[in-house]
Image (spheres, rainbow, N blue to C red):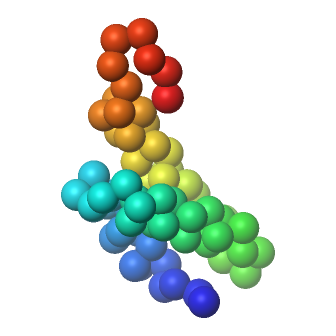
Amino acid sequence: MAVPLRTVYANLKRIDEVDVETSALYRQRAQEVLAQSGISLARRQVIARRLMQANQFLGMKTTTNGDSY
């Protein structure tokens, strides 16, 4: 099931507001978008950048002293 690019981007923007399961689903959908050859490079870069930011936020949020993501 194809999810519109705008929806994927919007979901990634608010990924810090959802539970862990929903967050994982949003990340999976973003990865699926990145794997589609029909998506332009510019749009893939926008999604990839936002996904990277979301992953960095998750890493900072879920780790404590001495832990790694």
At 34% from the left and 11% from the top, the residue drawn is: 65
35 or 29, nearer to the observer: 29
In the depicted structure, whether residue 49 falls above or below residue 63: below
At 47% from the left and 59% from the top, the residue drawn is: 24
- Residue 13: % across, % down: 31, 60
| 20 relative to 69 in the view: left or right | left
- Residue 11: % across, % down: 36, 68
At 66% from the left and 76% from the top, the residue drawn is: 39
Q: Residue furthest bottom?
A: 1
68 or 39, nearer to the observer: 68
| 30 relative to 23 in the view: left or right | right
Answer with the quarter of the image where residue 17 lies: bottom left
Q: Quadrant of the N terminus?
A: bottom right
| 38 relative to 69 in the view: left or right | right
At 39% from the left and 65% from the top, the residue drawn is: 22
Q: Is residue 47 visible?
A: no
